[in-house]
């Protein structure tokens, strides 16, 4: 009577099923394979890695450009003709794309770790292609339309590089488990050499990156300059409608050191505050004067301008997503704001001892004050009673006339020039975008008694970096945020940073070496120990090295034959090891019945 072996029971492998199912829709056991990944799938893995890197760069860029979202929305307003917060959809899409690609990459690395054949599903291939193309289009668009904004990446590194370095070292250290496993599985010496050299190159690069990392915040605290002055751009446009009296009052309440105003002149000669050339965005001109909605703001009489509401748009558009946070009192006040005359802001500044930075827009040629716009504005300022030392003058036109009529004004230029040229023109300061000057240049200007004001600075991390770099003042839409920043976000001495750098590198090296020893323990023991008591099949199986299903079955069959011939099949624990170690493989003959039994055990 023939006694049959019972059918082998396969335990459910839920994690492995999810891994291969989500990645390649291979949910069944028979669909999975330990065979080598095809060249086509390796190409897709390479595309996945490239897409991950590009999505990481794009997501990081768009996250850090948060400081300039309003500038982006303003650009889109000029293109589209209506106001909307375009930055949020872009951020959402960048986040979704990055998370999706990261998830696929993690699944792919898990396939490699467990020795499963990669087979990316066609839907994921389509999704990956869409993400890659979308990122390329977005990057090309930014490069053509907003090229200077790429500088934000290098500037942000001054705040994040020391911490990104530690994160990169940690990620590379965790990657050691995967690299060590691949090194142990491979039977090709050339591949092992290339793999280990590439990984070591990556580690050495990361370990030495701090040599080129620069951050002005890596300094001794006693060398930190005084806190930069904060000038409210159009008041506090996050808490009140821009360029209204309420906005400047809020700026004073939040301890702004000054106001930045955009001035134009009405048709009847009244200087008033407006940023745009038209009244469409910030007033209800389309309702009151629909036929004149596209007219230049300077072509209206002050009598007509007074009738416009300059506050309702703030709640309709909610440009900074802050309108809903206003109190009931502020809500009512903001809703009833009207356009503000320059003289009203000057009176407020004189009462609160605040500086006023004047940006002046010239009216159209057909305007009655086209030639005398400087004189009208100067007369208004001088008659307001504000001290001349509190006025910062920005317009380049007729600067000599202004210096003669108001010698006490602080003359500031928006054009970057050397200190000698600035002094010859009587200019004592520069008003530049934050990416147009570096820390070294600011120190050089300061040594020549030239102050620097940088705009627009809304994020605490950027304010902190510029503070450490030695900037004198910044213009901001977020006075209420920067007023809370009483010290830089972080500051550490060079000695402290070197200690963190060296410690993290030592810990990483220790972990990497430990992982390689653990992953390759059996190979090391075989090669350095008693080599005569081991055979290759036992070493590979004992090390749990995953190979193709066919190779594993061959090794199992050889080991079972060795057990039968050496009397190990009846051992109590069924181990492949004897007391003295692994038994060598024998080439002695095996009976057909034993061979059949061995194959049944394999299956």
Image: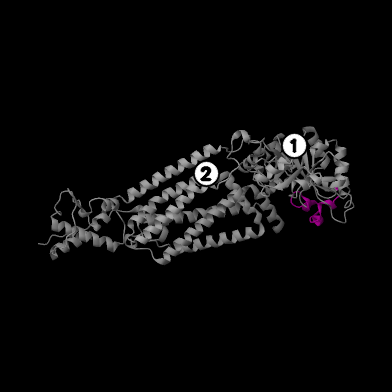
Q: How many marks?
A: 2
Quadrant of the rendering where the N terminus is positioned: bottom left
Q: Is residue 595 left or right of residue 151?
A: left
Disc 1 or 2, which lies upstream in sequence? 2
Query: Residue 468 occupies which quadrant of the picture?
Result: top right
Residues drawn in magenta: 277-303
Look at 46% across and 50% down and name the residue there: 204
Q: Position of residue 580 (x, y in %)?
A: 17, 49
Q: Position of residue 497 (x, y in %)?
A: 52, 39
In this rendering, the label closer to the viewer, 1 or 2: 2
How crowded pointer 1 is (Cα within 10 Å; few <14, some 14-19, many 20+) is rated as some
What SS does tag 1 mark? helix
* In contact (CB < 8 Å): disc 1 and disc 2: no
Q: Is residue 350 left or right of residue 49?
A: right
Q: Distance of mark 1 from mark 2, alpha carbons?
A: 39 Å
Between 580 and 383, which is closer to the camera in this rendering? 580
Tell me the tag on residue 249: 1
Magenta run includes residue 381: no
How crowded pointer 2 is (Cα within 10 Å; few <14, some 14-19, many 20+) is rated as few
């Amino acid at each position: 009577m023939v006694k049959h072996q019972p059918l082998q029971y396969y335990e459910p492998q839920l994690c492995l099923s999810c891994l291969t199912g989500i990645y390649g829709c291979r949910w069944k056991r028979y669909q999975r394979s330990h065979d080598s990944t095809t060249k086509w799938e390796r190409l897709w893995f390479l595309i996945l890695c490239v897409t991950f890197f590009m999505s990481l760069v794009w997501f990081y860029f768009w996250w850090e450009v948060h400081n300039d979202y309003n500038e982006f929305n303003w650009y889109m307003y000029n293109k589209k003709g209506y106001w909307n917060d375009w930055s949020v959809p872009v951020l959402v899409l960048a986040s979704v794309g990055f998370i999706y690609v990261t998830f696929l990459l993690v699944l792919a690395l898990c396939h490699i770790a467990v020795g499963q054949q990669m087979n990316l599903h066609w839907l994921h291939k389509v999704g990956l292609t869409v993400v890659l193309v979308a990122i390329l289009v977005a990057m090309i668009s930014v490069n053509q339309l907003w090229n200077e904004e790429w500088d934000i990446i290098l500037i942000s590194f001054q705040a994040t590089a020391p911490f990104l370095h530690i994160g990169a070292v940690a990620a590379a250290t965790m990657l050691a488990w995967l690299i060590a496993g691949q090194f142990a599985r491979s039977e090709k010496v050339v591949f092992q050499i290339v793999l280990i050299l590439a990984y070591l190159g990556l580690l050495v690069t990361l370990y030495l990156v701090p040599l080129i990392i620069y951050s002005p915040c890596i300094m001794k605290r006693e060398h930190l300059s005084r806190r930069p002055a904060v000038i409210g751009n159009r008041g506090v446009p996050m808490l009140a409608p821009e360029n209204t009296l309420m906005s400047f009052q809020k700026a004073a309440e939040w301890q702004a050191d000054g106001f930045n105003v955009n001035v134009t002149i009405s048709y009847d000669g009244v200087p008033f505050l407006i940023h745009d050339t038209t009244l469409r965005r910030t007033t209800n001109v389309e309702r009151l004067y629909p036929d004149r909605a596209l007219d230049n703001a300077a072509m209206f009489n002050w009598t007509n301008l007074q009738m416009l509401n300059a506050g309702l748009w703030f709640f309709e558009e909610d440009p900074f997503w802050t309108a809903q946070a206003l109190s009931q009192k502020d809500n009512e006040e903001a809703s009833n704001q009207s356009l503000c005359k320059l003289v009203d802001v000057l009176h407020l500044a004189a009462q609160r001892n605040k500086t006023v930075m004047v940006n002046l827009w010239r009216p159209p040629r057909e305007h009655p004050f086209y030639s005398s716009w400087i004189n009208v504005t100067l007369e208004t300022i001088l008659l307001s009673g504000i001290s001349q030392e509190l006025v910062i003058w920005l317009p380049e036109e007729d600067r000599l006339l202004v210096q003669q009529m108001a010698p006490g004004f602080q003359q500031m230029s928006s054009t970057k020039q050397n200190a000698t040229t600035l002094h010859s023109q009587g200019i004592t300061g520069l008003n530049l975008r934050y990416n147009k000057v570096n820390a070294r240049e600011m120190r050089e200007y300061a040594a020549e008694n030239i102050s620097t004001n940088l705009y627009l600075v809304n994020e605490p991390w950027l304010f902190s970096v510029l503070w450490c770099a030695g900037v004198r003042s910044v213009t901001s839409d977020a006075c209420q945020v920067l007023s809370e920043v009483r010290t830089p976000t972080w500051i550490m001495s060079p000695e402290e940073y070197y200690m963190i750098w060296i410690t993290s590198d030592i810990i990483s090296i220790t972990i990497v070496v430990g992982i390689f020893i653990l992953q390759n323990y059996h190979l090391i023991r075989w090669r350095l120990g008693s080599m005569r008591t081991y055979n290759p099949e036992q070493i590979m199986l004992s090390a749990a090295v995953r190979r193709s299903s066919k190779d594993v079955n061959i090794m199992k069959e050889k080991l079972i034959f060795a057990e039968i011939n050496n009397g190990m099949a009846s051992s109590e624990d069924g181990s492949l090891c004897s007391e003295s170690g692994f038994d060598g493989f024998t080439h002695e003959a095996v009976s057909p019945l034993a061979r059949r039994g061995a194959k049944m055990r394999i299956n």
